[in-house]
Image: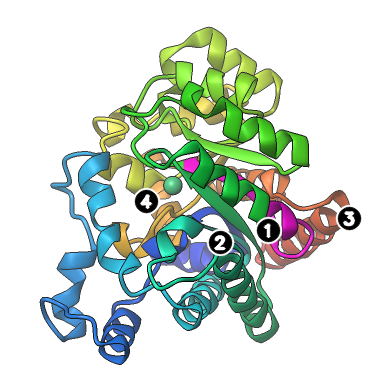
């Protein structure tokens, strides 16, 4: 009975998701339809059969293996129509889990095989999210990703295009890809440009490499949030810096276990980070690759770490504090969430 009540509460609590990749959030039925429509070959042509090609299991060995799953979805995401539809469906799926706000990230340069410009890719994702917001009432923002294995020039194009959409759907820029092979110091020139243009920066760091990458991301790339940061615990002074500067960590528990950012649930530092006063947030990363959703992330944390309802609410509201929203919109979102949480009988 108690478990059922918790389950029900977790799905009903209003939530936010700040770290979600567009190409890791494709519904298998959508992939199937788009592939048929576009004449793209698939290994199988049924929804169930596609799932193993799109998803990693417990046996996933590394971030590299995890990232290999994205080639499968990006192939069918080369038209404006496909980008718009998938962005719209991400908002729809967020609404199904009572997410009130979602930040969706994608790498424009990975969607240009059929001739779209960087600006066009961003335009279509923004449009899909706007339509989703109208239909499902979920607010959102787009984060444009620079890729670690791309050239400086290619990444600068992303920054410059993103700048044109600030205030019109784009809320930040990011750096993603193989962290171990491409440390953040390679990208100082790229993110100096985002700083010059006044675009907020979040960086994937401390996931597949150590805490020193978090230090570099914050001090030299201008990161005001960190993607994952799981390995921050390896360096006490860097952890203290992140805490003092109130840099939010976008943690993605299921993904972090699958990519081996930590060796096991026992080693997952979520409770210690929360108790040490770090601004920890909970996110999905890639629902269709990880086989998860935002309710499931909270459920696993609740089961594994015994988080109480007030602790779960604290994690949720950290996400509101960390959102790339201006103060007025953040206040509105906070009030809406607090009212709904109170109406569920959970104290704030
Ligand atoms: Zn990510």
Q: Is residue 222 magenta?
A: no
The image quarter in which residue 192 lies? top right
Query: Which residue position is annotated with label 4?
Result: 300
Label 1 CA crowd tier, 10 Å (few <14, some 14–19, many 20+): many
Residue 57 vertical placement versus 112 (above, below): above
Tag nearer the camera, 3 or 4: 3
Badge 4 marks a residue whose secondary structure is helix
On residue 328, which mark appears? 3
Report the residue at 41% width, 59% height from top. 110
What is the magenta range? 162-175
Q: Earlier in the sequence, mark 2 or mark 3?
A: 2
Report the residue at 63% width, 15% height from top. 241
C-alpha span from label 2 to label 4: 37 Å
C-alpha span from label 4 to label 1: 31 Å
Judge by depth and name the residue closer to the eye, 220 or 55. 220
Query: Which residue position is annotated with label 1?
Result: 170
Report the residue at 27% width, 60% height from top. 71
């Amino acid at each position: 009975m108690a478990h059922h009540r918790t389950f029900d509460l977790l799905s009903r609590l209003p939530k936010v998701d700040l770290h979600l990749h567009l190409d890791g959030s494709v519904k298998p039925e959508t992939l199937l339809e788009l592939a048929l429509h576009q004449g793209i070959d698939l290994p199988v042509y049924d929804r169930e059969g596609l799932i193993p090609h799109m998803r990693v299991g417990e046996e996933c060995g590394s971030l590299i293996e995890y990232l290999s799953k994205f080639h499968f979805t990006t192939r069918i995401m080369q038209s404006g129509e496909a980008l718009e539809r998938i962005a719209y469906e991400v908002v729809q799926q967020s609404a199904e889990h009572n997410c009130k706000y979602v930040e969706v990230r994608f790498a424009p340069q990975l969607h240009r095989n059929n001739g779209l410009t960087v600006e066009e890719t961003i335009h279509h994702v923004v449009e899909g999210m706007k339509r989703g917001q109208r239909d499902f009432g979920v607010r959102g923002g787009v984060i444009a990703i620079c890729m670690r294995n791309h050239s400086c020039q290619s990444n600068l194009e992303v920054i410059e295009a993103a700048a044109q959409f600030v205030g019109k759907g784009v809320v930040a820029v990011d750096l993603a890809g193989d962290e171990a092979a491409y440390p953040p110091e390679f990208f100082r020139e790229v993110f100096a440009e985002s700083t010059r243009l006044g675009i907020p920066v979040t960086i994937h760091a401390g996931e597949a490499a150590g805490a020193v990458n978090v230090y570099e991301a914050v001090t030299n790339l201008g990161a005001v949030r960190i993607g994952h940061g799981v390995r921050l615990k390896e360096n006490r002074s860097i952890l203290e810096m992140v805490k003092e500067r109130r840099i939010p960590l976008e943690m993605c528990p299921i993904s972090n276990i699958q990519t081996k950012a930590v060796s096991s649930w026992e080693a997952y530092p979520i409770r210690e980070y929360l108790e040490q006063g770090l601004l920890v947030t909970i996110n999905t990363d890639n629902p269709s690759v990880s086989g998860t959703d935002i309710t499931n992330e909270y459920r696993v944390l609740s089961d594994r770490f015994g988080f109480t309802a007030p602790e779960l609410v604290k994690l949720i509201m950290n996400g509101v504090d960390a959102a790339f929203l201006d103060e007025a919109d953040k206040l509105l979102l906070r009030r809406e969430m607090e009212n709904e949480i109170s109406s569920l009988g959970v104290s704030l």
